[in-house]
Image: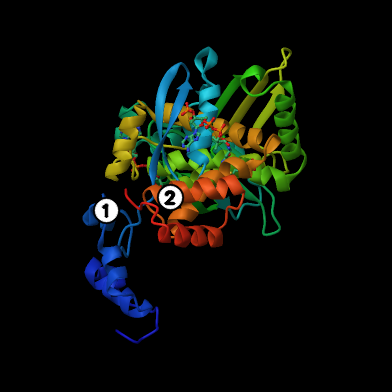
Amino acid sequence: MSGTKTSRIPEFYKRSIEERLKIVADFAGLTEDEVKLLKNFGNLDPKIADSMIENVIGAMSYPLAVAVNFLINGKDYLVPMVIEEASVVAAASNAARVMRRNGGIRSITTGSLMIGQIQVVGLSDPWYKRMLVLEHKDEILSKANEVDPALVKAGGGARDVEARVVEHSTGPMLIVHLIVDVKDAMGANAVNTMAEKVSPLIERITGGRVLLRIISNLADKRLVRSYVKVYKEDIGGEEVVDGIVSAWAFAAADPYRAATHNKGIMNGVIAVALATAQDHRAIEAGAHAYAARNGRYEPLSRWEKDSDGNLVGSLEMPMAVGTIGGATKVHPVAKVALKILGVKSANELAEVMGAVGLAQNFAALRALATEGIQRGHMRLHARNLAIMAGASGDLVDKVVEIMVSEGKINFAYAQELVEKLSKEGVADKK
Ligand SMILES: CC(C)(COP(=O)([O-])OP(=O)([O-])OC[C@H]1O[C@@H](n2cnc3c(N)ncnc32)[C@H](O)[C@@H]1OP(=O)([O-])[O-])[C@@H](O)C(=O)NCCC(=O)NCCSC(=O)C[C@@](C)(O)CC(=O)[O-]
Ligand SMILES: NC(=O)C1=CN([C@@H]2O[C@H](COP(=O)(O)OP(=O)(O)OC[C@H]3O[C@@H](n4cnc5c(N)ncnc54)[C@H](OP(=O)(O)O)[C@@H]3O)[C@@H](O)[C@H]2O)C=CC1
């Protein structure tokens, strides 16, 4: 295959990891060292990797950290976080530190209901057929619950049927929602299987044609609500409280700001999702769809000043996570991360993730409303730059110290310092 530049590779998936890697190495001109790097699967058994997704050629490690100081619903947590961005874990830990009073952050969930969508088309009378579907609710639920005895045994299962008529230029659609309690699973596979199972019955009831049968990631029946009081004296006084409330108001008024405000929340949420091998794309999709539920994109959290001048914050968002099923029980590090967290259910995991998102949001807004994000962020980013410039051991701290003290935090200066200090013999010792 060497020298060919076609990406058309029939039955690539049927080859071994070794063979696939050789094809890629030839295609991309990888060096021996680069190939060796990809051969290192780290703490993920190649066989497990090869069973998780298709066309596997290697594995990619990310830093796994723990955020400290979290007290949620009166329980202490060390929170595993996987992320590539400096300062996020420090920010979460710092925020959690000031949120420990009065039992810490409160977090509740609305349960574990997920929505399966069944799209019915070809109807001249969708509103009348909607009535027929609702009339046959019990039959539909019973059919749905035939497919997943383990979920039903675990106390879950199809719970309700909803139906809406959606008008579109291509013609009206009758959208049936199967509401399923998925308990400790994220629920996608379970819900999708049930939606497919009941579709022939829905066609018989309506005389229409079923097209899509799929979970909705706008999991607005599976919300986490996290809220906290932060005392003004713990964060620099009422002026800082006002600054944070004003920063929130900016996001509430402007979708351009709301997008970054919510990105700050997702810094925390997704870092925990990655550490516990959740479907983070589903979580992101649900979060941003929920942020737009009122017709314009809004912040997922709210910050206010209470009657004593303290800061009170609240977050409400979908949190479709699982402690059973998916990769949570397959990826060995995700299993350890769940053990570190010590959560007993998907609902408790959602409570933690909501709390971390709220704390992360607070940390960012407080920095933005006071010294600016760069002081804290760049000080930690300076370490990355020093290491990228080739520093190690004590040289890293020396380079960081000089860059921060001079306020010159950039890669070129890091390189200059590494070269200069190395010549001066600053120890490179570990
Ligand atoms: C970075 C800090 C925490 C420093 O803040 P500081 O006040 O200089 O920290 P400190 O030295 O006083 O330490 C206070 C606590 O912070 C933690 N902490 C302190 N240093 C470390 C460290 N090296 N490693 C781990 N944890 C650290 C640690 O918990 C420590 O407690 P202690 O251990 O002393 O009992 C603060 O400046 C901060 O929170 N900044 C905000 C940074 C941030 O939000 N980063 C997120 C990425 S920016 C982003 O993408 C989101 C954004 C901003 O765009 C969202 C938006 O726009 O809304
Ligand atoms: N977001 C999306 O649109 C889609 C996502 N996916 C992916 O599918 C992944 C996992 O799907 P998911 O359905 O959560 O997982 P799984 O299908 O892997 O596991 C859930 C199954 O575990 C069994 N189970 C046993 N005990 C319990 C319990 N206490 N609570 C819940 N279930 C229990 C159930 O029955 P049984 O053992 O009989 O199966 C249940 O169906 C998602 O993380 C996602 O990555 C897939 C399709 C679409």
Write down the residue under mark 2.
Answer: 396
Number of disc labels? 2
Badge 2 marks a residue whose secondary structure is helix
Give residue 219's position: percent from left, percent from top.
53, 38
Left or right, 237 with reference to 40: right
Write down the residue under mark 1.
Answer: 42
**Quadrant of the rendered structure where residue 257 is?**
top right
User: Label 1 neighbourhood size at 10 Å, few (<14), some (14-19), many (20+)?
Assistant: few
Of the residues shown, which amino acid type is indicated by label 2?
Val
Quadrant showing the N terminus? bottom left
Mark seen at residue 176? none
Q: Nearer the viewer, residue 141 or 223?
A: 223
Does the beta carbon at disc 1 come under 8 Å from ligand 2? no
User: Label 2 neighbourhood size at 10 Å, few (<14), some (14-19), many (20+)?
Assistant: many
At a point 30% along the width and 72% down the height, the residue shown is 12
Left or right, 2 with reference to 137: left
Badge 1 marks a residue whose secondary structure is loop
Left or right, 304 with reference to 327: right
Give residue 352's position: percent from left, percent from top.
46, 29
The answer to whether residue 102 is seen in the rendering is yes
At a point 54% along the width and 12% down the height, the residue shown is 102
Q: CB atoms at circles 1 and 2 under 8 Å apart?
A: no
Ligand number 2: quarter of image: top left
Tell me the CA gap for discs 1 and 2. Answer: 25 Å
Q: Is residue 202 above or below residue 94?
A: below
Of the residues shown, which amino acid type is indicated by label 1?
Gly
The answer to whether residue 57 is seen in the rendering is no
Give residue 147's position: percent from left, percent from top.
34, 40
Q: In the orientation shown, which residue stands out farthest toward the bottom?
A: 3
Give residue 29's position: percent from left, percent from top.
35, 79
**Quadrant of the rendered structure where residue 341 is?**
top left
